[in-house]
Amino acid sequence: ETGVTQTPRHLVMGMTNKKSLKCEQHLGHNAMYWYKQSAKKPLELMFVYSLEERVENNSVPSRFSPECPNSSHLFLHLHTLQPEDSALYLCASSRSQGAISNGYTFGSGTRLTVV
Amino acid sequence: DAKTTQPPSMDCAEGRAANLPCNHSTISGNEYVYWYRQIHSQGPQYIIHGLKNNETNEMASLIITEDRKSSTLILPHATLRDTAVYYCIVKNTNAGKSTFGDGTTLTVKP
């Protein structure tokens, strides 16, 4: 247990479904991140939130919609996904976006399969 | 953020030291070197970081060359559970994001 909890661990969804991924941390961190890891590819940064404000969107398609209601929770809302969106989705948090000693704490990820 | 280069794979005998190299020849003065590892199907785990001095913690040691163009992560007594992908990242602390490359797949063998 890393202190960053992601649910669900596994998700299978159809291309017309709407689902949400949840990330929760109680480490007192102020920055949260969504990463995507496709098979045999490096981690790709999707979104960065600092103090509940989105500070980066890495050209992610609009079918992925993040939400950060408070500094402890981060959601990724999914709708009309494509099979190529199947991947491991990882949430991470850090003390703040720009602090020294800014190691990230990652969750275990949600394994998403789009059918 | 500066680009890093790592060998794609390495083997290490159990109980021996694992030395994982990373080249970051374009690193700038305010960029730190971070190491993470990812065990299969889990999220990456922070290991250690440094600026220019060598660093040691309970997991590993980090040796940074004097010109800061390369570094080595040392696992002093590798175990089978250290088998993982190891990522070397350089990051400006004023930039929140960490950009991960392909990493080195370390296989510890009995």
Image (cartoon, rainbow, N blue to C red):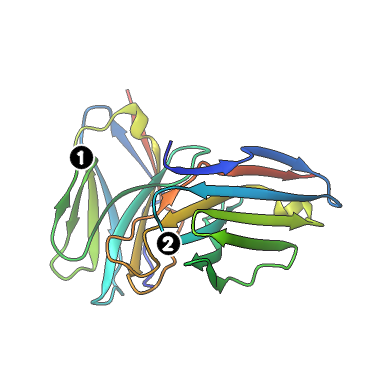
Instruction: Check disc 1 and report the residue beneath it.
Output: B58
Instruction: Check disc 2 and report the residue beneath it.
Output: A30
Residue kind at label 1, given as amino acid type: Glu
Q: Quadrant of residue B23?
A: bottom left
Work out whether A112 lies above or below B71. above
Point 27% across, 77% down: residue: B28
Q: Nearer the viewer, residue B104 or A55?
A: A55
Residue B37 x/y as whole percent: 38, 45
Q: Quadrant of the N terminus of chain B?
A: bottom left
Q: CA distance from mark 1 to mark 2?
A: 26 Å
Name the outermost residue toward the right. Answer: A16
Drawn side of residue B18 relative to residue B52, left or right: right
Q: Quadrant of the C terminus of chain B?
A: top left
Drawn side of residue B42 relative to residue A57, left or right: left
Residue A65 x/y as whole percent: 69, 63
Total marks placed: 2
Disc 2 crowd rating (10 Å Cα; few below 14, some 14-19, many 20+) is some
